[in-house]
Image: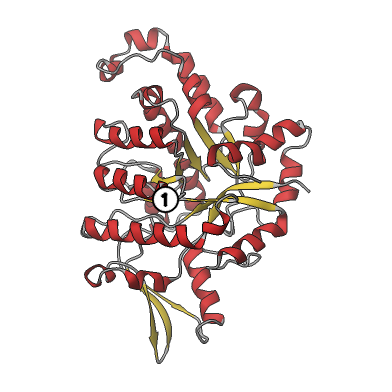
Amino acid sequence: MRTLITTDCHVAAPYEVLDELPAQYRDWFERVVHRDVGDYVEGPPSGGMTGAGHSETQIGPGAPGGPLRSSLVNHAVGASAEARPSFEPAEVLADLARENVLGAVLITPQLDFNPDRPLDADVAYCRLMNDWNAEQWAPYLDRVAPGIVLPARDVAATVKELERAAAKGLRPALMPDALSDVPYYSSEWEPFWEAANALQIPITMHIGSGQVSSSSGSAGMTAAALDNLKGAALVGWYQQCLAMGGTLGWLTFSGVFERHPDLHVIMTEGYAGWIAFAMQFWDHHFDSRFMEQHPLNTMFAEQPPLEMLPSYYLKRQAHATFMWDPVAVALREFTGTDCLLWGNDYPHPEGSFPWSQEWIDKQFAGVSDEDVEAMTRGNAARLFKINV
C-alpha cells in the first residue's frame, strides 16, 4: 500500500470556538442554538463556498458529546457516509490512515465576501481560527500543513495575518480562486506576493472559494440551479475548473510569477487536465502574429514582456490537484510532474476517500513508480514541508 499525502483535506474548528470572538462580532458568524424543538446551527455562514446571508439548519438530536457533536462535524465539513470526521486532530489523522494517507494539507473554511460585515470582524475571525489550528495541530506539524485563513477583502490585513500565522508554523496561505473587485493582476496585491515569496509560503486556492461575479463559473452554476436545470452542478464545476486556469494566466502574464520565483500557487480540487492545454495555448500564441496584429492586444501594451515562455512559469510555480484525472496523468510528458498533486478531498462525498488506493492503482496503471511517488507524495512533501 502506497504512502500518500493528500493536498485537499477539509477540517473545521468546533462552533464554540467562535464564542471567543469579541461580542460585537459574534452575530456575524454561525452559532449552535438549543431549542425545545431541537438543536440548530444558525447565522450567516462564514465559509467561502456558502456565500453571505442567514442560514438555519436543524441538527442532532442528542446530548453534547454524543450524536449532536457528530452532526455538528458533518455540518461543518460536509462529510460522506463513509468518513468519520472529527474536530479532534488525532481522530482526523486516524481516519485518513485507514487508506494510508499519512500527511495532509488542511483546508479550513474561508471567509465569504459579505460587504456588510466589518473588516475588523474578518480579522478577528482569521486570528481566532489560525490560533486554534496552530494550537490543536501543533503536535503534528511535521505531518500536516494547516492552511492560513486570511481576511482577503483587505490586502494590508491579509499580509499582516499571513506573517503572523506563518510564524506559528502554519502553511499554506488559503486564498480565493478568483477575485473580481480587486483582481490578482492588480498592483494592489503586490505586497502580498512579496510577503508570500519572502516567507516561501505556498498559496492554496480552493475551487469555489472565489468572489462571485456575473462572469464567473460559480455564478453561472447558481443561475442554472435556480432554474432547476439538470447538470447545473457539473457544468458549473467544469466552468470553475477552467476559470482556475485563468487565474494562473493572470499571475503569469502580469509578471507575478516572474517577479517572485519562490512563489507557488496551488489550484485545489479543480482537476488538472486543463493545465496542459493552457501551456500549449499560451506558448503557441505568445510569440506569434496574434500578439503583434490582433487589436485585442492593445490591453497588453503596458505589460512588461516575459523573459520566458508562459509554460516556463507554469511548470516552475503553478500546480493543480486532482482526485481522478487520467488525462492529466497521461499528459505529464508534456507538463512534467511537478505541477501535478493528488488529493482525496476528505471527507467530501465527491472525493476518493476511502478508496484512494484503488483509484490511484487504476488511474496510474502503467506509470513509473517514480512519477506516481512524485504526484501522490513527493511533490506535496516538498511544497508544504511535510515529512512522511
Q: Position of residue 194 (x, y in %)?
A: 34, 32
Q: Nearer the viewer, residue 41 or 326?
A: 41
Colouring used for the render = secondary structure
Q: Amino acid at mark 1?
A: Ile
Q: Nearer the viewer, residue 133 or 73?
A: 133
| 9 horizontally vs 130: left or right | right
Q: Nearer the viewer, residue 381 or 239?
A: 381
Quadrant in the picture for residue 44:
bottom left
Q: Residue at x 61, y 25 (%)?
A: 336
Quadrant in the picture for residue 86:
bottom right
Q: Residues within 10 Å of mark 1 (few under 14, many from 20)?
A: many
Q: Position of residue 213 (x, y in %)?
A: 30, 45
Tell me, yes or no, if residue 244 can be seen here: yes
Q: Position of residue 239 (x, y in %)?
A: 45, 41
Q: Position of residue 123 (x, y in %)?
A: 28, 56
The vertical placement of 64 against 365, above or below, is below
Q: Residue at x 28, y 67 (%)?
A: 28
Tell me, yes or no, if residue 213 can be seen here: no
Number of numbered discs overlaid on the protein picture:
1
The vertical placement of 119 against 58, above or below, is above
Tell me the element at label 1. Answer: strand
The vertical placement of 157 against 133, above or below, is above
Q: Which residue is mark 1?
A: 148
